[in-house]
Each structure stands twice: as structure tokens, then as C-alpha cells.
């Protein structure tokens, strides 16, 4: 007799919450809140508020954090989107496509450090993005700089056995899944960090279509809601994305990695939103 087809409803998704939405909490308190709320992991944004990569004794602090995550039963991915960590006066600067070579080198060095933290934590992946081109920047040159920087980070990640996932971001050089494919042709080892909400802001892929189309290449996934055409991260059910369809797609492809919420503007209501987001998404899953 043929083997029965697997039921996608039998596949349990694993959820995480990004610490950039928990900046009013100490990291240890934030992790306890996630574990107590039923999350499977944390998307750890290395930043001044949480696990500052430039503060003293990073190795000792990372070892202690790894012990804490194991004790709480939380997996992790490492996020690198801190706003003012590298330059306190310019948001998200410098980037991998910055004109200044010293600036690009500083970004690469930071990403290499993030890879080391991810390796020491046993994280599933380290996530990063390309950066926003300057208005008069030559895009071909920007692509060359990007590919060179990503190759350097990936080479270091290969030595540490860490997965690198590049995230398309609206307005950046790698803006959508098609741009990611162009980068992956130059640097085949990169995986896709898919924020499904971005698909209804830019690009030709629907969120659920991107999940199915890129399933073997997914290094990380985020599922916060967004209004159509507006890059504004919202809690589940507060935007225009068909989240139940996305969850169905993730279960159909049997996505095994963490699925994150990134709600960086909602730290003021994290005490309520952290448990509510998970409850909402689980209710949506159960209704399919």
C-alpha cells in the first residue's frame, strides 16, 4: 500500500520573538517572559540594550547566555539590525554598500562578530541585510560591494558552521525575493531570511507564494503583520497580510526553523503583546 500523505496540520511551527521589541525589558527578564508565554526561541538583536557585542567580556557573557537559553528551552537566531550600534548619529550605518571602505569594513567586522556569537549560542542562523543605496550611488558598484562583503561574512560563517540568511528589506538594495535570487547567484551559500510582511510592501511574490517557492532555501522566517504597501510592522491581525494562508504554507513545506515576530515599535506594550501575539497565531493555526 502507498504511504499515506502527510497532513500539514500535524506539523507544529516553532515561534520566536525579536528582542528589538523588548527593549524596555532586561534581557534575562525578556527571555523569561518568552519562555513563560510558550515561545520556542528568541530572535536576538545584538544591540546596546541586549547583549552588546562591543561591551567587555563578550565571550563570557555569551557562554552565560547560552546556558540561560538551554535552561529555558529556547532556541535562537541572531539578528543584526540594530539602529545606532555602529554609528550613534546615523541609523543603520554604515552598511555593506557604504561608499567609505572603512565603513564597509566596520560592518563586515560586526557581522563576523555576530557569526561568532551565533556559533557560541548554537543559533539556527545569523540574519543581515544589504543597506539603502545613496540617491546618486552607482547600483552596479553597490552590487559588487555587497557581493564582496557577503562573501567575506559567509567565508567566516563557513568556518564556524553558521548559516547566513540575507533579508530583503523594502527600500534596500536587496529589496525583494527577486533581488535575493540575484545575490544568491553570486554567493550561493546564502539562505533567504524571509519576512513575509515585506512581500505585501514590495516585490511580486505573495507571502505564501514566497514560502512555497523558496522553501528549500529558507534560513529564517518572520511573520509579523503589515498594511499593504506600507513598511510598518504590526502585531498579528493588525495588518493586511493573510496570515492563515502563510501559516498553512509553512506547515505544508514543513518549515522546521523558528518563525519570528519582529515588533520593534511595541516595546511599551510587550508585557501584553508577547503572550497575545502567540495566542493569536496559534488560534489562526488551529482554525485552518
Image (cartoon, rainbow, N blue to C red):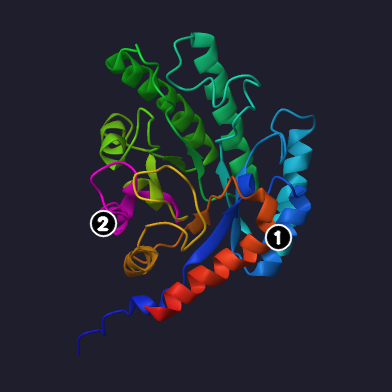
**Residue found at x 56% / y 71%:** 279
Tag 2 and tag 1, C-beta contact below 8 Å: no
85 part of magenta stretch: no
Q: Secondary structure at mark 2?
A: helix
The part of the chain drawn in magenta is 200-223
Find residue 41 and report its horizontal and vertical position in percent: 60, 59
Find residue 140 and report its horizontal and vertical position in percent: 27, 16
Q: Secondary structure at mark 1?
A: helix
Residue 251 visible somewhere in the drawing: yes
The N terminus lies in quadrant:
bottom left
The mark found on residue 271 in the picture is: 1
Judged left or right of residue 34, residue 94 is left
**Residue found at x 67% / y 63%:** 272
The mark found on residue 212 in the picture is: none
The residues tagged by marks 2 and 1 sit, at their Cα atoms, a distance apart of 33 Å
Find residue 98 and report its horizontal and vertical position in percent: 46, 16
Judged left or right of residue 257, residue 210 is left
Question: Eyeballing the image, is 201 above or below 32?
Answer: above
In this orientation, which residue lies closer to the viewer: 228 or 288?
A: 228
Mark 1 surroundings: few (<14), some (14-19) or many (≥20) residues within 10 A? some
State which tag comes first along the sequence, 2 or 1: 2
Q: What residue would you read off at disc 2?
A: 209
In this orientation, which residue lies closer to the viewer: 37 or 200?
A: 200
The C terminus lies in quadrant:
bottom left
Question: Eyeballing the image, is 147 above or below 98?
Answer: below
**Residue found at x 77% / y 52%:** 28
Amino acid at each position: 500500500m502507498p504511504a499515506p500523505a502527510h497532513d500539514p496540520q500535524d506539523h507544529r511551527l516553532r515561534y520566536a520573538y525579536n528582542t528589538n521589541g523588548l527593549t524596555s525589558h532586561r534581557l534575562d527578564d525578556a527571555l523569561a517572559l518568552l519562555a513563560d508565554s510558550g515561545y520556542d526561541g528568541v530572535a536576538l538583536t545584538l544591540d546596546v540594550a541586549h547583549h552588546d557585542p562591543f561591551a567587555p567580556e563578550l565571550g563570557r557573557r555569551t557562554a552565560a547566555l547560552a546556558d540561560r537559553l538551554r535552561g529555558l528551552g529556547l532556541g535562537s537566531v541572531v539578528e543584526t539590525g540594530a539602529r545606532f550600534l555602529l554609528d550613534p548619529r546615523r541609523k543603520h550605518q554604515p552598511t555593506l554598500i557604504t561608499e567609505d571602505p572603512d565603513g564597509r569594513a566596520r560592518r563586515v567586522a560586526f557581522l563576523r562578530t555576530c557569526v561568532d556569537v551565533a556559533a557560541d549560542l548554537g543559533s539556527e542562523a545569523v540574519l543581515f541585510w544589504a543597506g539603502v543605496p545613496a540617491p546618486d550611488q552607482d547600483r552596479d558598484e553597490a552590487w559588487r560591494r555587497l557581493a564582496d562583503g557577503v562573501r567575506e561574512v559567509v567565508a567566516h560563517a563557513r568556518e564556524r558552521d553558521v548559516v547566513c540568511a540575507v533579508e530583503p528589506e523594502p527600500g534596500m538594495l536587496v529589496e525583494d525575493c527577486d533581488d535575493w535570487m540575484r545575490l544568491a547567484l553570486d554567493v550561493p551559500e546564502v539562505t533567504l531570511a524571509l519576512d513575509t510582511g515585506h512581500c505585501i510592501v514590495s516585490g511580486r511574490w505573495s507571502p505564501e507564494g514566497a514560502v512555497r517557492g523558496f522553501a528549500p532555501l529558507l534560513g529564517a522566517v518572520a511573520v509579523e503583520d503589515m498594511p499593504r504597501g506600507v513598511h510598518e510592522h504590526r502585531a498579528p491581525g493588525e495588518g493586511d497580510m493573510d496570515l492563515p494562508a502563510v501559516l498553512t504554507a509553512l506547515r505544508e513545506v514543513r518549515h522546521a526553523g523558528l518563525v519570528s515576530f519582529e515588533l520593534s515599535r511595541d516595546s511599551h506594550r510587550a508585557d501584553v503583546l508577547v503572550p497575545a501575539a502567540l495566542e493569536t497565531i496559534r488560534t489562526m493555526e488551529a482554525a485552518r
